[in-house]
Image (cartoon, grey):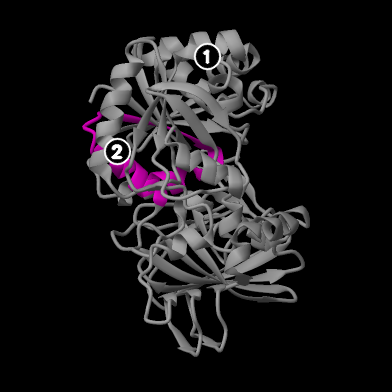
Amino acid sequence: MNIIPVIISGGAGSRLWPLSREAHPKPFIRLPDGSTLIGRTYARVAALGVERVVTVTNRELLFLTSDAYAEAKAPKLDNTFLLEPFGRDTAPAVALATVHAAATQGTEAVLLVLPADHLIQDEQAFATAVERGVALARTGRIVTFGIVPERPETGYGYIEVDGEDVIRFIEKPNAEKAAEYVASGRTYWNSGMFCFSAATMLKAMQDHCPEVLSGARAAYEAARRIESDGRTAYEVDRQAFGATPAISVDYAVMEKAGNIIACVPTDCGWSDIGSWAAISDLVAADESGNRITGEAVVEGAKNCFVHAEDRLVGLVGVSDLLVIDTPDALLVAHKDKAQDVKHLYNRLRSEEHEAAKLHRTAHRPWGTYTVLEEGDRFKIKRIVVKPGARLSLQAHHHRSEHWVVVSGTARVTNGDNVILLTTNQSTYIPCGFRHRLENPGILPLVLIEVQSGDYLEEDDIVRFDDVYGRP
């Protein structure tokens, strides 16, 4: 299909805390089957027969996204990344993608915009809807995809239609109104998926939100282009993008563009996976209605969902609970309050609590590190470096480090010396020494790092050289 899919990956997924966090948000959490939402989205667009994909995401998520795409069961595509310094909602993201498409493929290019964090079970129905949407987009329409509602739902916006023409967009209703909309047969859930030609969207934005378009264009034109590992990335200008209004594409364009807006209905097994209740629906229930991932023992419990990662969870005589257990945070909530988890996340974030930003295992371009234990003046990490990867050449002002290789081969720069270490060998990095860790082998490098000093946070890093372009 001769279109440009645009995957927009943003937002923290606050209602899926503690699995979703600022540095590892909702698109990257593992579903019960082991897949990720962003990986499934990538595979879904690849199945349309396209040649290229554009992804709009945060600069800090570039390598996590690349890893998710490499893991997805999909043919390799021409990947371009438009990297935002921070989120400004969906209208600036759509504007960036449209400006890029017009500049590289021409204004007649047709874009298919998809959120990275939605689940679609019936991919054939999705492909059929996309085919119809593309046909309408080529006639100058901006197409939204309406989801045939399964039930009255207060968590989604609605679209009222007359045939394929959109009459109005409706904000999230109360229960009574939602039931009325579903019964009418004239409304669909608003999926947040769109299709349009670059020319049509550029004109609509010029007419209805020119500040968004001009800001995105300035940010794109001043972007730093980065070519590496078979991908092209544009790191958009921070100042110009920061001056761009933060607004959703629904408010900026869709609700204002009148009769050029069309709706293609689809019944494709869609879910925005907006809460733990939606995640639990993906797991088969036992005879008592309990749904469990991981190891759990239940006695007299009913209608509970348990996500257990590293340890056994036991439930006795309780019902209708969500129990989400991760290595460093535990969530217990009533099912009826699944939507309110976001308030807890926002509180943690406002207090700058580490559990709102990072997991105990943190992902980096070169691999991962896991904090095993920490206390007064010490921290112990398990570090895994991908084959062929290297950390930055760096130094620390406040800590020294001991490295012990568990498996694999490490090439270590330690001051003026470069050495090779293998299993059970170690080295000591004094405070202030320039150092670098590399994996020259074909297998993952695993080592234990023991930090010692008066300040052990991640911002005590001075980088002198970094192959991933980090400051």
Q: Position of residue 357 (x, y in %)?
A: 63, 56
Residues tagged 2 and 1 counted as in contact (Cβ below 8 A): no
Q: Nearer the viewer, residue 100 or 414?
A: 100
In the drawing, does residue 1 fall left or right of residue 176?
Answer: left
Q: Nearer the viewer, residue 174 or 219?
A: 174
How crowded pointer 2 is (Cα within 10 Å; few <14, some 14-19, many 20+) is rated as many
Query: What amino acid is labelled 1 in the image?
Result: Gly
* Residue at image coords 29%, 41%: 44
Q: Position of residue 244 (x, y in %)?
A: 66, 22
* Picture layout, residue 104 above or below residue 72: above
Range drawn in magenta: 37-66
304 in the magenta segment: no
42 in the magenta segment: yes
For the N terminus, the image quarter is: top left
Residue 126 - label: 2
* Residue at image coords 49%, 31%: 159
Q: Nearer the viewer, residue 191 or 171?
A: 171
Q: Position of residue 29 (x, y in %)?
A: 46, 57
In the drawing, does residue 116 fall left or right of residue 170?
Answer: left
* Residue at image coords 36%, 33%: 265
Q: Let me know if residue 21 appears in the view.
A: no
Query: What amino acid is labelled 2 in the image?
Result: Phe
Residue position for label 1: 258
Which mark is first along the chain, 1 or 2? 2
Q: Taken as a whole, is the magenta stretch helix, strand or loop?
A: helix
Toward which corner of the image does residue 195 lie, by quadrant?
top left
